[in-house]
Image (cartoon, rainbow, N blue to C red):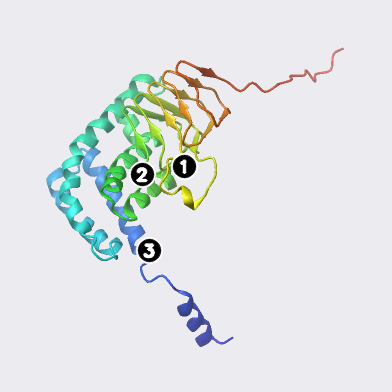
Amino acid sequence: MNLDTVIKEIKNNKKLPNLKFEIKERTEAFTKHLFYTLFDEDTEVEENIKKLGQEFETLADLVCWKPNTPCRNIWEEYIEKLPEILQKLNADARAIAENDPAANSVEEVCLSYPGFFAIAIYRLSHEFYQFGLPLVPRLMTECAHNLTGTDINPGAKIGVPFFIDHATGVVIGETAIIKDNVKIYQGVTLGALYVDRNLRKLKRHPTIEDNVTIYANATILGGETVIGANSVIGGNVWLTKSVPANSMVSHTPQINIKNTAQHE
């Protein structure tokens, strides 16, 4: 096969005219600028809100290729939500700083905690998801996923405050509901019982009520699964059924310890 034929075959198999990696790159830059505008003391707010508006217009034109989707109109409504989003994130950061003995300040939380960054990008993307903006919300949370190992779908509904400790390996599905003052550790999955395209419009991820703690590597599956308020879910637990309020759920594998040192 000669070079001309190879080029022709590649062109023939590029079947998605709207698949432009510029969308991903611009979303990543937009997400960073948005985060800095809300948190960085040296990033001037008024000037950057204007710049963000321009960046958003470019993104909207790229992702809204279907007819009758006036995505540009979302921006003015979105920026009205930013003060409320920032209040929620400040509450998240304070809760982490006040409850984690390893945290030395709220500044440390905002700068170095991957769980906080993942929550921040989730909250910022969730409002775009609510407005029905295509692609951008998911690409925003993928920015956080790539940097933190934490995968929160922008469609999830998450109360305040929320704390993900250590963060790596956490998965929170699109229809999950997490209420107020919930704390989860690394490796936790809030997922669906199985994957089927017919479940697209249905609730398929669990509900976590107020004041629940879920320890490392616990897996909780199913749209009808509810973890009752004030419950503690231990590490490595696998749940597909609801748990009443004030429960303690644990997984206790048998562990054998043998002293292999030789005795005289």
Number of on-image labels: 3
- Residue assigned mark 2: 154
Q: Residue furthest left?
A: 46
Q: Secondary structure at mark 1?
A: loop
Q: Earlier in the sequence, mark 1 or mark 2?
A: 1
Q: Earlier in the sequence, mark 1 or mark 3?
A: 3
Q: Residue at x 38, y 66 (%)?
A: 19
Structural distance between the alpha carbons of marks 1 and 3: 21 Å
Q: Can you see residue 45? A: yes
Structural distance between the alpha carbons of marks 1 and 2: 15 Å
For the N terminus, the quadrant is bottom right
Structural distance between the alpha carbons of marks 3 and 2: 20 Å
Residue 151: name its quadrant: top left
Q: Secondary structure at mark 3?
A: helix
Q: Secondary structure at mark 2?
A: loop
User: Taking 187 as reference, is 113 left or right?
Assistant: left
User: Taking 61 as reference, is 24 left or right?
Assistant: right
- Residue assigned mark 3: 21
Q: Residue at x 29, y 65 (%)?
A: 66
Question: Which is in the foreground here, disc 3 or disc 2?
Answer: 2
Dot 2: within a 10 Å radius of its alpha carbon, few (fewer than 14), some, or many (20 or more) residues? many
For the C terminus, the quadrant is top right
Q: Earlier in the sequence, mark 3 or mark 2?
A: 3
Label ID, residue 149: 1
Residue 169 vs residue 154, the one in the foreground? 154
